[in-house]
Image (cartoon, coloured by chain):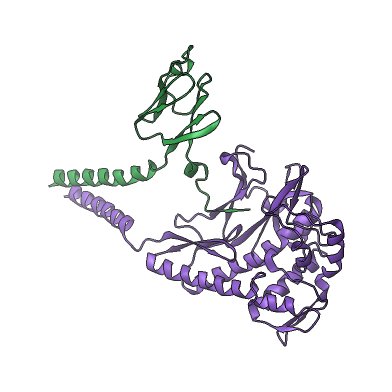
Amino acid sequence: MPNYKLFMSLFLCLFAMFLNSCSSNKPSTYKKSKALLDTFITITVVAESKEKADNAIENAFDVIEKYGDLINFFSDTSELSDINRNAGIHGVRISPETLDTIEKAVYVSEKSGGAFDPTIGPEIKLWDFLNKIKPSDAEIRRNLPLVNYKNIIIDRDKSTVFLKKKGMLLDLGGIAKGYAADLAVQELKEKGINAGLVAVAGDIKAFGLKPDKKPWVVGIKNPRQKNKDDEIIARMPLRDKAISTSGDYERFFVMDGQRFHHLLVPSTGYPAYTCQSVTVIADKGVTTDGFDNAMFILGPEKGIELATKMGLDAMIIDNKGAIHTTTGLQGKFTIERNH
Amino acid sequence: MADRLLFILLISVSIAGIFISKDALSQGSDVIIEVDGKPAYTLPLYANRLLTVGGPYGNTLIEIQGGKVRVKEAHCRNQLCVREGWISKGVIVCLPNKLVVIVGGSKKDRQQGIDAITG
């Protein structure tokens, strides 16, 4: 009965495939969002069960929330506010996470020659982008001496940070979201998750592969979106990489035909005008988040130069809408049809 | 015996086929109806429906059927929109009624394959 054996084995194969496709142990993606760090965070994980996914995601949210409490610029009880209150007075003992974030911020400042500066606080607080309030030239000039990352004194052994001048304000907003994405991914991995995507607003970290064994795909926002069909300018497949974008469209207002946005040049206190957006890809979120700011200030040529020197990948859209990329990115991403 | 097994095999294949094609058909397209330059209605292309849209020349009757859309009745003079017939992609414009019918990918389609957005 050779036919019988053939049919039986075919049938069993098909039955096994069918069972496999319905089995609850097949990895799926699970996604949850939460408002934290004054922004919107979405975590996607690949897991065998909803229970495992939920547990890991909730733990990752907790880690982000705790971190946010330490570095919140606007909360009186944060470690960051403690440092700022004691500027020019004494150093403040802080947690390893806050210390590490400040060290990483200073590192980006040094590597970018001060294009990124976490002591930009006194200038940023003069602007009100929501109510379209532009500070006077005199006000901007007056606070400039308070902006200098070299006046951040870090004592690693004592775990303290001291701001040398009274009135200095450390603002970690340009790097903390990327750092938070790193922390969340670390937590997810500790909870046994092998693949996922953590999006702290536009600071995203991807690890592992999707259930279909393909990399995660991140869309890069079009800085001059005209309608709902052109929200994305390019798409970038990612695996075990972080991606961040800084754009002049995030917090801005237009006055007398001029756009004023939140990416201020530390040496002048005014917005930088050579780019519309800068996207950076690297291993860590803290790197991409810090360097996208720095490159935005530096402009397309010097920005790409810095990225290449640092071994990072970058896509810069200049003020005319032209796209510049590092050579490492060539062939690795697609630009949407309508651009 | 072999015949019976063949029968079971064929049944199994067709059941598997249902699961596979259900996945493939889950993408949809949208019919977007703009009135006076503003999006007024967004409807799925894969659900049969009749819709009346008011305008300067009275009501225009739009019909969606079998993955296609047409202007069934209009009270404008030249009836260009009605003569356009059924479309499954593209645009029908009725200038006198300031009415535009667009068949496009749904938001899900446009951003298909994107897991997150940076920026």
- As drawn, is A126 to the left or to the right of A268? left
Determine whether A152 is above or below A236 in the image.
below
- As drawn, is A333 to the left or to the right of A86? left
Identify the colour of chain A in the image: purple
Q: Nearer the viewer, residue A322 or A42?
A: A42
Identify the colour of chain B in the image: green
Q: Residue at x 70, y 51 (%)?
A: A252
**Quadrant where the C terminus of chain A lies?**
top right
Q: Residue at x 23, y 50 (%)?
A: A6
Q: Number of marks in the image?
A: 0
Quarter of image, res A20: bottom left
Would residue A308 be visible to someone looking at this image? no
Q: Nearer the viewer, residue A331 or B59?
A: B59
- As drawn, is A118 to the left or to the right of A37? right
Q: Position of residue B15 (x, y in %)?
A: 26, 46
- As drawn, is A204 to the left or to the right of B52? right
Determine whether B88 is above or below A238 in the image.
above
